Amino acid sequence: MNCEECTGFLHDYLAGELPDKQQRIFEGHLSLCPQCVVYLESYRKTLALGALVAEEPAEPIPEALVHAILAARTV
């Protein structure tokens, strides 16, 4: 497995959905490639941050701001 192939398995690996044989090959590549380990950790953190953002409800936009933006658009 090379680095490019490795990136194609990141999501399934983190989701625990890789078949055993592919997981062993993937982890074998990680054991030899510190760059892919860094990339995997970055990918893991990105997914975690994305999940946090998705959980937080957005605050409602103040009516006055909406009216001000709409008024500025017509000028």
Image (cartoon, grey):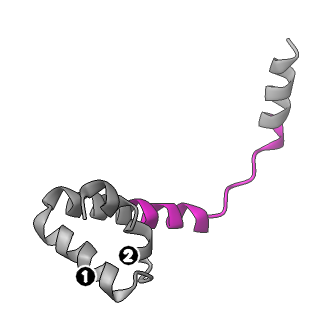
The image quarter in which residue 41 lies: bottom left
- The x, y position of residue 59, in whole percent, is 69, 55
Please report the bounds of the magenta region as a residue range: 46-64
Which is nearer the eye, 69 or 15? 15
The image quarter in which residue 69 lies: top right
The image quarter in which residue 14 lies: bottom left
**Nearer-N-terminus badge (2/1):** 2
> Which amino acid type is shown beneath numbered disc 1?
Arg
- Which quarter of the rendered picture does the C terminus lie within? top right
Classify 65 as above or below 62. Answer: above
Disc 2 is placed on an element classified as helix
Please give the residue where the numbered disc 1 appears in the rendered image. 24
Which is nearer the eye, 54 or 65? 54
* Image point (24%, 59%), residue name: 2
- The x, y position of residue 7, in whole percent, is 35, 59
Instruction: Mark 2: give few (<14), some (14-19) or many (20+) Cα within 10 Å.
Output: some
Q: Specify the label residue 46 is tagged with.
A: none
Which is nearer the eye, 47 or 21? 21
Classify 20 as above or below 2. Answer: below
Whether residue 54 appears in magenta in the rendering, the answer is yes
